[in-house]
Image: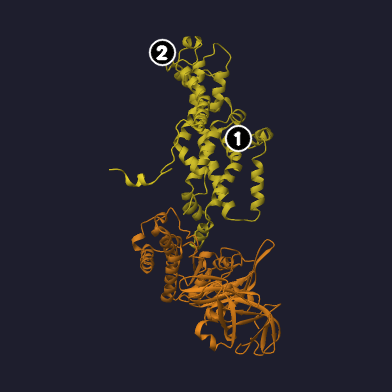
Amino acid sequence: MVDITSSQLSGPQGPKPRKALSRRNILLYGTLFVVTVYYALPLYVMIVTSLKGMPEIRLGNIFSPPVEVTFEPWVKAWAQACTGLTCDGLSTGFWNSVRITIPSVILSIVIASVNGYALANWKFKGADAFFTILIFGAFIPYQVMLYPIVIMLREIGLYGSLTGLVIVHTIFGMPILTLLFRNYFTSLPEELFKAARVDGAGFWGIYFRIMVPMSLPIFTVAMILQVTGIWNDFLFGVVYTRPESYPMTVSLNNIVNSTQGVKEYNVNMAATIITGLVPLTIYFVSGKLFVRGIAAGAVKG
Amino acid sequence: MNKSVEIKNLDLEFGAVKVLQNLNLDIGKGEFLVLLGSSGCGKSTLLNCIAGLLDVTAGQIHINDKNVTWAEPSERGIGMVFQSYALYPQMNVEGNLSFGLKNAKLPKDEIAKRIKRASEILQIEPLLKRKPAALSGGQRQRVAIGRALVRDVDVFLFDEPLSNLDAKLRADLRVEIKRLHQNLGNTMVYVTHDQIEAMTLADRIAIMRGGQIMQLDSPEEIYGRPVNKYVAGFIGSPSMNFLEGRIEGDVFLVGDLAIPLAGYEFASGNAVSGEASLGIRPEHVVTGELVGNAPFQIDIDVSLIEPTGSDTLVDCEVAGHPFRVRMDGQAKIKVGERLRLGLDLSKASLFDKTSELRL
């Protein structure tokens, strides 16, 4: 039997047909492909090289996959590579970085979130001036403050210690994190805050019971920003610590830039990947929340 | 009358902007007072001052004969319901209801008792374990009212509680709020810009404009005898018709018409004369068979018709002024037709041309 409805209609009907190979699609996917290759190729080269032995690398085919897969360079980068005087690889630097990053991230986020909450919800006298000064701090180049902070840390006896570096990281994270939290808390409905006040909750009660539970996305964003920022930091690490407590980035630099002997490209590549693994993992694990936090303000009760 | 809320010489300024100016207001025990006005008139600000969410610049607020001007919101014996419900999204309904009670460190069995009572009154028992996101707008607002209810306070403050709901739900919940007030007998202060809500709910309405109360009276009085032209135009939908003219002796002259003032009660008791505007509500114009009884009659041309079902609104012109008439929904009328209107000034209002005050 003939389909009655379609036989009665003439002319365009139903969904508009689309060509799979239109000019628009070719351009779109072509561009995406080129950009992907541009970013993925160096990573590919790094991984491939790190799995080759030195004789194979000397052949010069950097794009070819390893004939004989070896994890020797990775082990060496982690445990044996020489960083200046000592030869225990990245492991010391890794644990130093962990000991720097975790307290810095927690401390800076805790302080900044309370700051942001106070600025957004409890309009105290001089709040605007305070906020302006804080934001201004975000635009002062680090180099200007480098030496004064050395002196200050020396005076309070923290120069060269991990504690000193943690304090420096916390302070430098403050402007941008406070701005982040303030804007997020401002975007939450003000009536929630009012309702909680009528319900008799105080400053900390509202913060812990109302605000924090609603703010997972922004805490994630702050965490990612801080972890990557502090983990990747080189300048503060090299300026404010001593060689035995250098963070991983400094160790990596010392391995890669050491001038004695042969350049072990495979070890260098492996060391670089290991160093980058932490921020990379953080991104992959919390990417979804990160996007939600960046698009914050869309959280409705 | 026992006073529940007293506001004395209240001023509130945001920087250089004076939002409330020397405002005085007494609200009786068990009274339902509606603060009505267009947006920006300071009505919500006033409510926030009563709640203690805003610090006042000058003046005093007393609740239950206690000066609470400096008291925290939770210490004032008030419960508040917000336009956006303001339910805590991460807590379920029970958590929302108990949050304030837990903050007040009430014993567990007392909390359970109060939640039970409130949820029975508002019929939200089946919802207690749900999160606010899983509730409809009407249910959310019920929970929000419940949150005020469990606090067991004397004064309820409503900040446009129905504005986020659709028209049907709004009408339903309006009735429920009125019933709640009848059953509980608490003092309620209710902010709205919706005059229907104001007229149906209020014992007294305070019409606000520019941070001041223009008129504080019963709904009937505000509707029937507005104190000035602003109130007259604001209350009533469709709004009042105004004819600009002159009072001379016992007639009102507009264009070439002379409308007799017989039956009009002047505010001062004595007739006055001079420039004035005459306000007549569309529903107070007589049409059809009863026209013959009206003291003044006029023929007009119908220029536009708006049928609403229950009644029909007719647009026309009287002495060069746009004029609307409310007719029965059954009325058969066409554009361009001639219609005879009857005016009776006993229900009309006269306002002074310059001061805009009622004459």
**Discs 2/1, front:** 2
- Residue B257 location, quadrant: bottom right
Chain ID for orange: B
Q: Nearer the viewer, residue A162 or B134?
A: B134
Q: Position of residue B143 (x, y in %)?
A: 42, 62
Q: Position of residue B327 (x, y in %)?
A: 51, 77
- Residue A246 location, quadrant: top right
Neighbour tally class for label 1: few under 14, some 14-19, many 20 plus, Cα within 10 Å: some
Q: Nearer the viewer, residue B325 or B142?
A: B325
Q: Position of residue B46 (x, y in %)?
A: 58, 68
Residue under pointer 1:
A158
Relative vertical location of residue B352 with respect to residue A41 in this rendering, above or below: below
Neighbour tally class for label 2: few under 14, some 14-19, many 20 plus, Cα within 10 Å: few
Residue under pointer 2:
A68
Relative vertical location of residue A95 with respect to residue A260 in this rendering, above or below: below
Relative vertical location of residue B242 with respect to residue A194 in this rendering, above or below: below
Q: Is B155 situated left or right of B301 in this image? A: left
For the question of whether residue B149 can be seen, the reply is yes
For the question of whether residue B24 can be seen, the reply is no
Q: Is A146 situated left or right of A102 in this image? A: right
Give the position of the C terminus of chain B as an image quadrant: bottom right
